[in-house]
């Protein structure tokens, strides 16, 4: 079996990074929901500690986004470059998939900014 082309590798990198960012956004939403629930009140004696831990976890999650966004933009630029250089010699399905992933990544970038 032939090794994957540079275009296929670049496509999968962008796709993975976009999926990773979506996962972090989902995690952030879950953490915010848990914090809200803890703030609404709990008779648990550990509630204050749990609230502090959840807030710290939320801050750590938020710190991931700038570097992840930069990685996505770098990988997207590389994928677009591969589309230009290898687009003519790559199989049509790889080119189509790469273009779809480029569109997905640009959409994800617009939604967050």
Image (cartoon, rainbow, N blue to C red):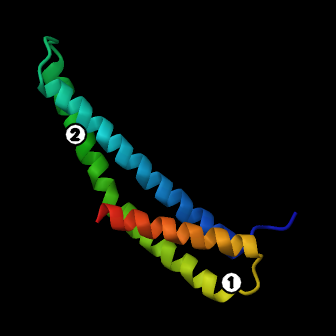
* Sequence-earlier tag: 1 or 2: 2
Q: Secondary structure at mark 1?
A: loop
Q: Is residue 69 left or right of residue 75?
A: left
Quarter of the view holding residue 27: top left
Q: Is residue 86 left or right of residue 67?
A: right
Q: Residue sitting at 31 percent across and 43 percent down? A: 28
Q: Secondary structure at mark 2?
A: helix
Q: Is residue 91 visible?
A: yes
Q: Which residue is mark 1?
A: 87
**Image quadrant for the N terminus?**
bottom right
**Image position of 65 with respect to 106: above or below:** above
Q: Residue sitting at 31 percent across and 47 percent down? A: 61
Residue 74: give x, y in percent of width and height: 46, 74
Q: Is residue 84 left or right of residue 59?
A: right
Q: Nearer the viewer, mark 1 or mark 2?
A: 1
Residue 93: give x, y in percent of width and height: 73, 70
Q: Is residue 71 visible?
A: no
Residue 75, numbered label: none
Q: Nearer the viewer, residue 64 or 41?
A: 41
Quarter of the view holding residue 106: bottom left
Q: Which residue is mark 2?
A: 56
**Image position of 1 with respect to 61: above or below:** below
Quarter of the view holding residue 56: top left
Do the CB atoms of the residues marked 1 and 2 lie less than 8 Å apart?
no
Q: Residue sitting at 42 percent across and 51 percent down? A: 22
Decide: few, some or many residues near mark 1? Use Cα within 10 Å; few <14, some 14-19, many ≥20: some
Q: Nearer the viewer, residue 29 or 20?
A: 29
Residue 47: give x, y in percent of width and height: 16, 20
Q: Residue sitting at 68 percent across and 75 percent down? A: 95
Residue furthest right as drawn? 1
């Amino acid at each position: 079996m032939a090794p994957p082309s540079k275009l296929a590798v670049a496509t999968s990198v962008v796709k993975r990074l976009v999926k990773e960012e979506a996962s972090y956004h989902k995690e952030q939403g879950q953490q915010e929901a848990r914090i809200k629930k803890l703030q609404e009140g709990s008779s648990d004696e550990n509630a204050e500690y749990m609230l502090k831990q959840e807030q710290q976890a939320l801050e750590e999650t938020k710190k991931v986004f700038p570097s992840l966004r930069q990685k996505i933009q770098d990988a997207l630029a590389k994928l677009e470059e591969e589309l230009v250089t290898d687009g003519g010699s790559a199989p049509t399905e790889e080119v189509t998939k790469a273009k779809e992933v480029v569109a997905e990544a640009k959409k994800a970038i617009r939604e967050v900014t």
